[in-house]
Image: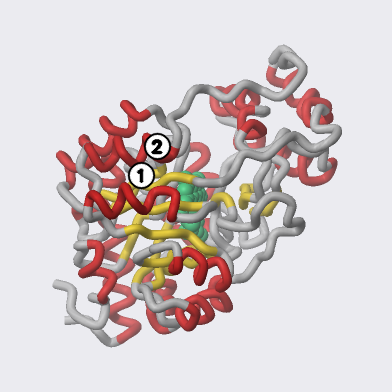
Amino acid sequence: MIVAPLRTPLCELLGIRVPVLLAPMAGGVTTPELVAAVTGAGGLGSFGLEGMSADAAHDAVRRAVELGGPPVGINVLLAPTEGPEPGAERVHEVLAPFRRELGLDAPPPGPPEPPPAAAPRALVEAGLDAGASVVSVGMGDPAEVSDLARAAGAPLLAGAATADEARRWARSGADAIVAQGAEAGGHRMTPGPGAQPPPLVGTFALLPRVVDAVDVPVIAAGGVMDGRGLAAALALGAQGVAMGTRFLVSEEARLPRFVQERILGLADVDTVITDQVTGRPGRWIRGRVVDALVAQRPGTYGWPRHRHALWDVRTAGAERADVDLFPMLAGQGAGLAGAIRPAADVVAETVAEAERILGAGV
Ligand SMILES: Cc1cc2nc3c(=O)[nH]c(=O)nc-3n(C[C@H](O)[C@H](O)[C@H](O)COP(=O)(O)O)c2cc1C
């Protein structure tokens, strides 16, 4: 049984028993089984819907609600489209040796054609129609979907990586802010186009600033891997945590086993932030492809097109189970995960450990 103080006002807002959120992760990682397991354990399971068709999003959400019941969260990315940088063609020169190694043909010249995916509003509509009851956005202004969330009575969460951004999203109608520290895996919530280098504020410095800056509940994201992280976040004023990397190594995540094993073995210095893999700054596991792009900085085709520039390499890297040729987003905390575990156990152990630390256990 969970008792106060781990039950925060955020729990009331989201309809959850414990203040642990599965951070939304696009790319198919957040399966219905993973989302349902986190919700079933009393937290909030959330889908990263970016890149999906509206039908696929609808099916996934409906399945998670069937498996784990409400609440189920959905997330979309709102980053504006950016154009190619001068010289972006050089990205294929950097990738050429890897393509030769993998026996892949050179891609046609010019920016890649992204596969069809639904627009953020269509994804939110599909997810809400299928039974989602929490909406979150990353990399943009939540006002873009706030009418949809309001109409459905769903709380709206917005990711922020600076205190200023948190203030802006609260003014735009966010019901809670996800404060994403620099440690986090995934893309940075900020900056806008052209901000180089991106402002990188660690979770410990960011969290109290955001808590002071806004009147809505704050959720800590970035480097939270266990109950120590949850306890620290609560102590700094957060009302909950969103864990991404920890759930990458859960049994229900859709991620090849060789990648999960690599994540378990990562040292604190084994990830790097770069915009050269997808066109926006993200934190990646270091490996031969990522290191070559970081070192040679060929330029990008811009977001979101650049994301597809090395899709063939990644797919072939997965077939070979070669982690060096399979660029993957993950946070600095990765190696702290310990073991591949069922997601419900991760939630329960995280809460139990935080309760012990905070002296809040039964
Ligand atoms: C593989 C991966 C994919 C992600 N995709 C999204 C996404 O689609 N939308 C989003 O708002 N955040 C996304 N993120 C960021 C997470 O929601 C969260 O901020 C981050 O994982 C927290 O830090 P941690 O990885 O240290 O736990 C992603 C993170 C990872 C690792």
Per the image, the residue denoted by label 1 is: 47
Per the image, the residue denoted by label 2 is: 254
Residue 301: x %, y % from top left: 72, 33
Badge number at residue 98: none
> Residue at 55% of width from left, 50% of height from top?
186
Q: Count up the numbered dots.
A: 2
Vertical arrangement, residue 161 with respect to residue 250, above or below: below
Residue 99: x %, y % from top left: 73, 21
Spatial distance from mark 1 to mark 2, Cα to Cα?
Answer: 12 Å
> Residue at 80% of width from left, 32% of height from top?
88
Q: Is residue 249 in sight in this rendering? A: no
Residue 277: x %, y % from top left: 68, 39
Secondary element type, mark 2: loop
* Location of residue 231 by image quarter: bottom left
Q: Nearer the viewer, mark 1 or mark 2?
A: 1
Counting residues from the start of the chain, the first of labels 1 and 2 encountered is 1
> Residue at 29% of width from left, 39% of height from top?
127
Q: Nearer the viewer, residue 20 or 118?
A: 118
Query: Does the closest atom of ligand 1 sit within 8 Å of the Cβ of label 1?
Result: no
Q: Nearer the viewer, residue 170 or 105?
A: 170
Q: Amino acid at mark 2?
A: Arg
